[in-house]
Amino acid sequence: MPKPIMAIVGRPNVGKSQLFNRLAGKRLSIVEDTPGVTRDRLYAESDWRGRDFTIIDTGGIEPSNDNEILQFMRFQAETAISHADVIVFITDLRTGVTAADQDVAAMLLRSGKPIVLAVNKCDKPGDPPAEFYEFYNLGLGEPYGISALHGYGVGELLDAAYEHFPPEEEGEEASDRIRVALIGKPNVGKSSLLNRVLGEERVIVSNVAGTTRDSVDADLDNAHGRFTFIDTAGIRKKSRVDEKIEKYSVMRSLLAVERADVCVIMIDATEGVTEQDTKVAGEAHNAGKACIIVVNKWDLVEKDGSTMKEYTLRVREGLAYMPYAPVLFISAQTGQRVDKLFALIKAVHEQNHMRIPTGRLNSILAEATARVQPPTDKGRRLRIFYMTQASTCPPTFVCFCNDARLFHFSYQRYLENQIREVFGLTGTPVRMVIRERGDKD
């Protein structure tokens, strides 16, 4: 089930990043007393009242400004707003209600999203000062006085935001679908692939607008199973196309990755793996999602008998951190090999959910350690007592040993490869967690 999304917005230098860091529990955003420090949207996970949710920190909104960077920041904030389930609008007690605050409030009201108004820098506990009440003039309902610096009032603010989270999904209807995100840089063919998939071999197709999101999720039932495709295309706005728009693909893909079970990472065959592709793919890898690398526009590549093999090697080199992901060469335009995508999606989804019995795991562990002895350091040898699978999505294995410092990364990779050799685990990352015996964490 996708997590609720809370966007923190406001004009520059009102304390958005400070609140973001407090909710995230770590210093992810740069906090500086200079407007415009946060230019890109940042994401983090948090929880409140037993509910996990995603926070988006945005650059400050300057409603009327010709500065190119500030316009870029405004567009990023608008994108965050369009994806959010609830918006926390931050203002500044010390400056009072400004014309910029009024413009931002009007923009937020036009979005139709639930808004929680926070008045930051109420740094003294107790009743708020008289100037606090002028924020009622923004027409956004009751303001909440907070101190992002000291934490005063943040709990009440989160309670108010929590009331606007979408209800948790129940029943089997939502869970038996495989959610597939088509991710990649602009113009790689995501929309073309989605249209091709929906236009062929379909039994039941319905377009369901994502809850409080501007993108449209497409449900598809066919002979292969039940799927929901999350389209991340449509990033470009015709009036705002420039070189900086490339950054949006990574940021918007973050939200698609969060909601997905399987990520289809699309590469342009005419360009190869670019830096932008590595960033997008890295998000899916780090999130532990099942992944498929799809090389699109294969019909535009001149070929000989070894072209596909050589291209696969280049893809593996460019995305060296995900050798587990299968590579599929397609043409969304002509439909070449698109029919093979469904079987791959089902396969990697099953692998991502695979659970291996502890007994079999430890048999593999015994064979692997007998074949290659665990490392030693200064006469002390690593001893691995046993291994168990802690979770799925991705498969996560916990190894209990005598000294975690001796468990070198190379030996972890060796054990991972031994597990993959027996069980496959194609299309999914694998996590190894090292614990010393007696470690209760």
Image (tube, helix red, strand yellow):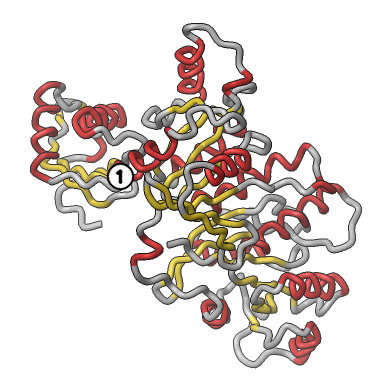
Residue 373, quarter of the rendered image: top left
Residue 11, quarter of the rendered image: bottom right
- Residue occupying the point 68% across, 79% down: 117
Q: Callout 1, which amino acid?
A: Glu
Total marks placed: 1
200 left or right, relative to 1: right
- Residue occupying the point 13% across, 35% down: 383
Nearer to me, 69 or 214: 214
Nearer to me, 372 or 86: 86
- Place of residue 267 in the rendered image (x, y in percent of width and height, measured from the top left): 57, 30
45 left or right, relative to 245: left
153 to 183, vertically: above or below: below
Q: Can residue 435 be seen in this view?
A: no
- Residue occupying the point 47% across, 19% down: 312
Per the image, label 1 sits on a secondary structure element best described as helix
434 to 296, vertically: above or below: below
Q: In which quarter of the image is the N terminus?
A: bottom left
- Place of residue 304 in the rendered image (x, y in percent of width and height, measured from the top left): 53, 7
23 left or right, relative to 192: left
Nearer to me, 60 or 189: 189
Q: Quadrant of the C terminus?
A: bottom left
As drawn, the residue found furthest toward the top would be 305
Nearer to me, 105 or 120: 105
| Residue bearing the label numbered 1 | 350
* Residues packed near mark 1 inside 10 Å, few (<14), some (14 to 19) or many (20 plus): some
87 left or right, relative to 318: right
- Place of residue 129 in the rendered image (x, y in percent of width and height, measured from the top left): 73, 90
- Place of residue 324 in the rendered image (x, y in percent of width and height, measured from the top left): 36, 30
181 to 337, vertically: above or below: below
Q: Is residue 211 visible?
A: yes
